[in-house]
Amino acid sequence: MSQENLAKTRWLVVADVVTAALVGVAQAAERAISIRGEFHIVLAGGNTPKALYERLTNLETDWSCWHIWYGDERCLPADDINRNSHMATQAWLANCPIPATHIHTIHAERGAEIAAADYAEQLQQVEMFDLVLLGLGEDGHTASLFPDQFDPDNPAAAIAVHNAPKPPADRVSLTVRCLNGTRAALFLVTGAGKRDAVAAWQRGDPIPAAAIAVKTGVDVLLEPVCVKENV
Ligand SMILES: O=C1O[C@H](COP(=O)(O)O)[C@@H](O)[C@H](O)[C@H]1O
């Protein structure tokens, strides 16, 4: 969004985004657990983070300290395979002993408005996230904040989203304000389909991903194929 955000964005082009992300998550968890005894992570949805979540299953850590939050959810039945929670559960959460009460699902099956209000209430439990994982859509969206539809200054924590250009149309998303309440933010970007969105972000276009700002800077892990100069 602002030139200041852009200056604080670290573009990390790596051959293996999953391994780099795994190292980043492991370090953030270790640090948070050693300092505060708990680790609050926000998960990205979509396809990109699935391989990371599968690898996290084998991480050596104190899972009892982990708290799982979601950056967004799609308004579909709870067990629908296109739910972000379904993907994360199948790939990771069902296979590790994080206490069930530490897994904060967005109940998007209840409808966007009800689920957003409920999640905003749940979010009051957390003062600050330790790590927010995010993806980047082909159109520059992140979480379920879509271009020309999102309000970077919305003071709410979670919002109902309708008419999303990527199905399903109805979703729930954390807001920019809420996502920015974190000690660190890490984007995972893979595939040539993200090249135009990355170029738009790097030239300073006000895409939703560019609104994410953290005091210490935002890390963006990119495959070489996502960066135009590497084509
Ligand atoms: O719809 C969504 O899209 C973005 C990007 O997904 P990907 O499949 O291209 O990785 C994702 O970050 C978001 O959580 C999801 O709901």
Image (spheres, rainbow, N blue to C red):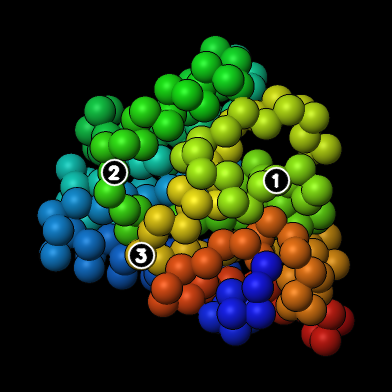
**Residue 229 sits in quarter:** bottom right
How far, Cα to Cα, is label 3 from label 1? 23 Å
Q: How many marks?
A: 3
Residue ID for mark 1: 150
Whether residues under marks 3 and 1 lie with C-beta atoms below 8 angstroms apart, the answer is: no
Viewer-side label of 1, 2? 1
Q: Is residue 117 left or right of residue 93?
A: right
Viewer-side label of 3, 1? 1
**Residue 102 sits in quarter:** top left
Q: Which sits in the foreground, 35 or 80?
A: 35
Q: Which mark is residue 203?
A: none
Residue 92 spot, x, y in % from top left: 42, 41
Q: Amino acid at mark 2?
A: Val
Residue 113 spot, x, y in % from top left: 58, 20
Give the residue drawn at x 28%, y 43%.
126
Residue ID for mark 3: 183
Is the CB atom of the residue marked by disc 1 within 8 angstroms of ligand 1's nearest atom? no
